Image (cartoon, rainbow, N blue to C red):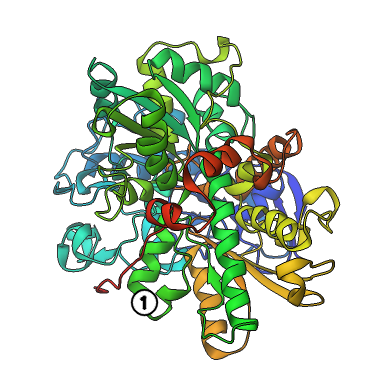
Amino acid sequence: MPTLTIDDIKVEVPEGTSVLNAARQAGIRIPTLCHIEGRDPIGACRVCLVEIEGARTLVASCSQPANEGMVVHTTSGKVREGRRTVVELLLSEHDGDCQVCARSADCELRNLALELGIDELRYQGERTARTIDTSTPALVRDTGKCIMCRRCVTVCNEVQGVGGLFAQGRGFQTVIGPAFGVDLDEVTCVQCGQCAAVCPVGAITERNQIDEVWEALEDPAKTVIVQTAPAIRAALGECFDYEPGTLVTGKMVAALRRLGFDAVFDTDFAADLTIMEEGTELLMRIKKALVDGEKVALPQFSSCSPGWINYMEHFNPELLDNLSTCKSPQQMFGAIAKTYYAEKIGVKPEDLVVVSVMPCTAKKYEAARPEMNDSGVQDVDIVLTTRELGAMIKQAGIDFRGLPDEQMDAPLGISTGAADIFANTGGVMEAALRTAWAIVTDGASFPFPDLHVKPIEGLEGVKTATLKVTGAKGDWAFLEGADLKVAVAHGLGNAQKVIDQIKSGEAEYHFVEVMTCPGGCIGGGGQPRFTTDEVRQKRMEAIYREDEGRELRQSHENPSVCALYEEYLGAPCGEISHHLLHTKYAEKERV
């Protein structure tokens, strides 16, 4: 445990701790544009320079280990001038278009320049060559704005394990992007948007669809409805300077009404519906395997996360049969809205516009998938990220903080606490277990306090649990005493670890939940930046508070979902629901 002094503050840290993290432990902020929490340092940006007594030059604090007796200065004149020079050099190459850049308000480079007092550019030179890549439905790349920090490379390769982005070329000719300078749609990219979430500037952003929403809202021939994912309510407030983890559900609903939507609904409704379908599917698979002796694809993998679906199609196509056939809640909502709901209000499906607000950029890709049209038209028309909704509310001049709290509309706005926790890693699994247990035991109490399955909660990358079934009744009596083995992974790199264990026979599970993004949807690629584990934890806690404050906390208790089955669908995994709410996926070439 070396002890060092940073700006006259003594701090003791574990062996191997970087000076950057030692300073953070002491409450001292050192700026950086390339560092990602929990990842090995690369020292690419050189913004985190500090002065160490006895060293000949300034050093990058992210890659400098803390040593016993070290004396560090983070604000000396030499340090300030060094950081200023680095940022000025970055600005000299940066083709930023700050006046109209989507990142102007939260650009880390611009904010750092202001912080360092840079009011003129001393260095004028050639700027980075600009290529704009709009080849995918979810993401836009602008090489002219790239500052070569390599955060996107780190998250794509080390966190997600996808490998769609690398540094190409050398020196001033270096470009961060897909191999051979091709567009994103020509390489394996799951469109999760984690690259856009960590980019400090505007080099990678989501495809902006705000104008499409305004156009739909202003078309008198269209009925425009909106659904909001569970993760939005715990993050949207950050766009309006609320603390991370502040629940703004009621103000969000009020803002959406003032934007002009004809009805404000909740993706939570479809999350409850997903549990009814996916939970039933799981039990049917287990019964076929154990009772009927059929060869069934187990474990069953969850299918709510479109980036995860893309990953499986590219990287593990031999396990596609293990994916639940259920569509995601977003797509279930669209299919129900353009059939059941459209009939109820007397609107033709082609005249009903379904807008989604999602924490995820891959949802834009998912909505555009050709198989997502079982209603007879495209089930979901437009997808906005949390960031886009925040921008749209500001465009409309709405005083978000001054809004009253309002309620979602019925019937597609009625939901339970089980649907809320879909936002968190482990939430889909916990929600499914709550209802599956009720089905198997004919309504017996869930054997976990306050309905929470603690072993699968939290930010550990891979979480597992074994539940011993007690009280099984009726058609499910064969499960009495059985061990139900489950696993939860978030971040695609962690998901692959579980898959490798399953393939090798090292582990056996019945049900596996995977979320593409670290922390689950609360850490999605479309959420307000910058998302650290501290921010993820606060958002997760808010989602659990939302769940615990509900009168109904299990999906099978949702009265609107029950009415939907009685009036329209018939039974979970029945003929109508299978047509509208289920799908199949196919192998994709890995490039």
Residue 264 placement (x, y as % from top left)? 47, 24
Residue 151 appears left or right of 467? left
Identify which residue, 470 or 527, lies in the foreground. Answer: 470
Identify which residue, 16 or 269, lies in the foreground. Answer: 269
Whether 111 is drawn above or below 215: the answer is below
Quadrant the N terminus occupies: bottom right
Whether 221 is drawn above or below 455: the answer is above
Q: Residue at x 60, y 41 (%)?
A: 562
Task: For label 1, count other residues whose C-alpha is less than 10 Å away and answer few (under 14), some (14-19) or many (20+).
Answer: some
Q: Residue at x 55, y 34 (%)?
A: 235
Whether 281 is drawn above or below 291: the answer is above
Q: Which residue is mark 1?
A: 317
Q: Residue at x 22, y 58 (%)?
A: 184
Residue 71 in view of the camera: yes
Residue 571 placement (x, y as % from top left)? 54, 53
Identify which residue, 318 or 136, lies in the foreground. Answer: 318
Residue 543 appears left or right of 75? right
Give the image quarter of residue 37. bottom right
Q: Residue at x 54, y 71 (%)?
A: 300
Q: How many marks?
A: 1
* SS at badge 1: helix
Residue 360 placement (x, y as % from top left)? 43, 46
Residue 321 placement (x, y as % from top left)? 43, 75
Give the image quarter of residue 244. top right
Quadrant the C terminus occupies: bottom left
Residue 250 appears left or right of 585? right
Residue 384 in view of the camera: no
Residue 523 appears left or right of 172? right
Q: Please name the amino acid that badge 1 sits on.
A: Pro
Identify which residue, 3 or 18, lies in the foreground. Answer: 18
